[in-house]
């Protein structure tokens, strides 16, 4: 195993091949799936694969903290922003899809768009 370095002598921090991480460690995505976040802790190990071109950092699960929830004001701001992306600037109609940035108008207003 090329990337098996549990002491960190070769890569500076403990390094494991893909799918060989020890129990108790997780990537950011794995923490996110458990509704957790690193919470300021530093990286404790890493996974490497594809000849060292791919790296995923590992964090301790026991030190992870719950994800923060958005406030009602933040949720309202997101709703307004998403709604604004669906209003066509040409015809000012609210569409059920986001207006393409490439054309800057809805499919009905775009020449050569929808029939």
Image (cartoon, grey):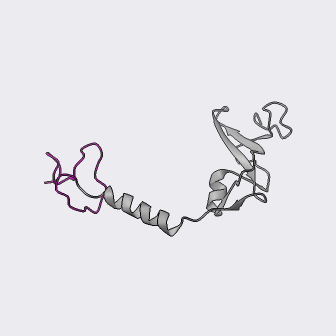
Q: Residue at x 83, y 36 (%)?
A: 8
Q: From the image, give the main secondary structure of the stretch colored magenta.
A: loop
Check the picture and name the quadrant holding the N terminus.
top right
Q: Which quadrant of the view contains residue 48?
A: top right
Residue 10 image point, x, y percent: 81, 30
Q: Residue 41's x, y, as percent? A: 75, 50
Q: Residue at x 16, y 56 (%)?
A: 91
Give the answer, above or below, for where 34 lies relative to 55.
Answer: below
x%, y% of residue 15?
77, 39
Task: Say whether residue 87 is left or right of residue 66.
Answer: left
Instruction: Name which residue lies at 29% across and 49% down.
Output: 100
2 to the left or right of 33: right
Magenta residues, as a range? 89-115
Q: Which residue is more in the foreground, 7 or 78?
A: 78
Measured as percent of width and height from the top left, residue 32 is found at: 62, 58
User: Is 113 one of the magenta-colored residues?
Assistant: yes
Q: Residue furthest bottom?
A: 72
Q: Is 3 colored magenta in this rendering?
A: no
**How many numbered marks does the figure carry?**
0
- The residue depicted at 67 percent of the width and 38 percent of the height is 49
Quadrant position of the C terminus in the picture: bottom left
């Amino acid at each position: 195993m090329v990337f098996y370095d549990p002491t960190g002598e070769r890569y500076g921090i403990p390094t494991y091949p893909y799918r060989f991480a020890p129990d108790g460690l997780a990537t950011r995505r794995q923490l996110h799936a458990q509704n957790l976040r690193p919470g300021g802790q530093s990286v404790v190990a890493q996974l490497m694969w594809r000849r060292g071109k791919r790296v995923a950092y590992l964090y301790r699960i026991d030190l992870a903290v719950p994800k923060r929830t958005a406030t009602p004001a933040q949720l309202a701001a997101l709703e307004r922003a998403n709604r604004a992306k669906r209003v066509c600037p040409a015809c000012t109609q609210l569409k059920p899809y986001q207006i393409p940035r490439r054309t800057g108008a809805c499919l009905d207003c775009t020449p050569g768009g929808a029939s």
